[in-house]
Amino acid sequence: MRKNIVAGNWKMNLDYEQGLSLFSEIVNMVKDEVVGDQEVVVCSPAIHLHSLHQLTNSNKVSVGAQNIYQAESGAYTGEVSAAQVRSTGAEYVILGHSERRAYFAETDEVLAEKVNLALKNSLKPIFCIGETKDQREQGEFFNVIQEQLEKGVFHLSASEFAKIVLAYEPVWAIGTGLTASPEQAQEVHAFIRKSIAKAYNSDVAEATTILYGGSCNPTNAKELFSQTDIDGGLIGGASLKSRDFLDIVKVFNT
Ligand code: 13P
């Protein structure tokens, strides 16, 4: 009943031509090889968005941004607004990625504003949550995740929340080659779903797509995605290689 999604996060990689070339490969491979109803999303740097959107020839591949600014418009030199992103044809935006929380000091409060602006401009947030290595080792991870949900997205009405995709990305697993085990990931995904059921109701919880992210690759994706509460992945490094990315997408073919 809920949608399976595999989303690539290109981060700050690929120049304009390289981005177009990788995206064309992905679109063609999806057309030729994907037989399930999983959705494929590519979150590129803002400079690529409009051109990538023009290359999407099937509604199975969508385009997303990696950030928006927390104001509608105005004197914010160098920033990009939700409306500007939407005007490129992009449908999604990653919000709350741990790299933005850590390197750009994005707080839960700022993120809640970004979530509101994304929804107001018909962009679907892929909202990231997850604990650091220390927080895991101290056994604080459920509390951390609960707080990120409460402050970032639980202020939404049920109908607004229905437009959100969540991504559990343990910070210690991002770009490190250290993946959460399927059991560790499932434990947190089940916790997140329970938490949504408490904040809203079980129908809303069951309908929410919750992605796993953190060193996901063609070898470990199958076991991760076969867990009851894992509905796909948010893929960093492996999304920069069309073959690897497609092999991850195709986990849902079978
Ligand atoms: P890696 O897949 O490179 O670990 O990155 C995960 C991530 O941060 C996706 O948003």
Image (spheres, rainbow, N blue to C red):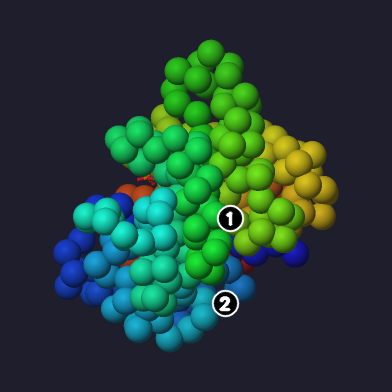
* Residue 243 visible (yes or no): no
* Residue type, label 1: Val
User: In front: mark 1 or mark 2?
Assistant: 1
Q: Is residue 34 above or below residue 166?
A: below
Describe the element under mark 2 as helix, strand or loop.
Answer: loop
Q: Residue at x 44, y 35 (%)?
A: 107
Give the residue at mark 2: 35
Q: Which mark is residue 165?
A: 1
Q: Position of residue 61 (x, y in %)?
A: 46, 74
Q: Residue at x 62, y 66 (%)?
A: 254
Q: Residue at x 22, y 56 (%)?
A: 78
Along the horizontal axis of the image, is 180 left or right of 74?
right
Q: Position of residue 191 (x, y in %)?
A: 70, 35
* Residue 170 visible (yes or no): yes
Dot 2 crowding, Cα within 10 Å, few <14, some 14–19, many 20+: few
Along the horizontal axis of the image, is 132 left or right of 208?
left
Q: Position of residue 153 (x, y in %)?
A: 61, 45
* Mark 1: C-beta under 8 Å from nearest atom of ligand 1: no
